[in-house]
Image (tube, rainbow, N blue to C red):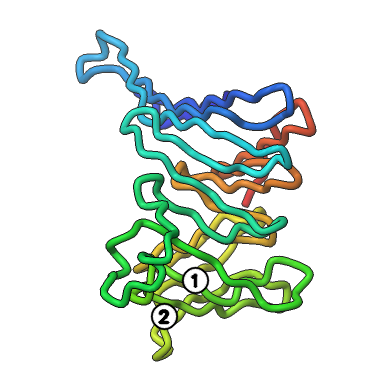
Amino acid sequence: MIRELRGKRQHTEHQFKWNGQHQLIEFKKIRHYWDENDKDFHQTVETVHCYEYDAFGRRISKTNMQTGDKTLFFWQGENLITECHADDADFSVEVISNEHTKAQDYRCISYIYEPGSTGFRPMAQLVGRGRGGQIYYYLNDQLGTPQELITANGDIVWSGVYKSYGNLAIEYRTVPQNLRFQGQYFDEDKFVWNKFEQYFSIGPVRVSIRMIRIIRVTL
């Protein structure tokens, strides 16, 4: 559990639950606060997400337990190739070849990596499904870390300046871009996953499963 203090009147708890394979299976965010008269103390569960994994330890689903929304993750080896809302996970020939689909019709993002690259150097991102999907292109640094995401006309739709562990100090975005350092994925819960080292970064706190402690760092 991580407790984040916000003045004297409230604090936020980040609760983590792991299974026997050291995989995060539940994340819960709870806000505790006093009322305006400082008489009654309240708590509100803001976020509850549950996660599932395949036999290789790759996360294959994330479920928002409050809304029921479920996101599926598809892999090719160690590379994440698609994240898709469960209701839109239709990969039939009819959908893929449909010329009339639009990017917003399907809540899916697919990733294309550089051919022959041994790491995780993303080359393009496809938003949506079918021929009507929108394609964006990655501009990476020498390590393969995404720096910008652009359209075919060169317009920037995402750019970021990184902190030490993959969190962003500055971000500009008009479309989602969740890839960070190699092997990292940014979650909407405001923390960064690393599927190989099994750590999660939330603001100034780095949680490592391999070490039974919490390391505070100044970013």
Residue 154 drawn at (x, y percent): 43, 89
Q: Are marks 2 and 1 in contact (CB under 8 Å)?
A: no
Label 2 Cα neighbours within 10 Å, binned few <14 / some 14-19 / many ≥20: some
Q: Would you name the residue on which mark 2 appears? A: 156
Residue placed at 50% from the left, 64% from the top?
110
- Quick one: SS at disc 2? strand
Image quarter hosting the N terminus = top right
Q: Is residue 203 above or below residue 47?
A: below
Q: How many marks?
A: 2
The answer to which quarter of the image holds residue 92 is bottom left
Q: Would you name the residue on which mark 1 appears? A: 125
Instruction: Please give left or right for residue 88 compared with residue 125 in the image.
Output: left
| Residue type marked 2 | Ile
Q: Is residue 82 above or below residue 63?
A: below
Label 1 Cα neighbours within 10 Å, binned few <14 / some 14-19 / many ≥20: many
Residue placed at 42% from the left, 52% from the top?
89
Q: Earlier in the sequence, mark 2 or mark 1?
A: 1
Instruction: Please give left or right for residue 7 compared with residue 144 in the image.
Output: left
Mark on residue 148?
Answer: none
Task: Give the CA distance from mark 2 to mark 1.
Answer: 13 Å
- Quick one: SS at disc 1? strand
Residue placed at 53% from the left, 44% from the top?
191
Residue 137 drawn at (x, y percent): 50, 79
Residue placed at 51% from the left, 68% from the top?
160
Residue 120 drawn at (x, y percent): 69, 66
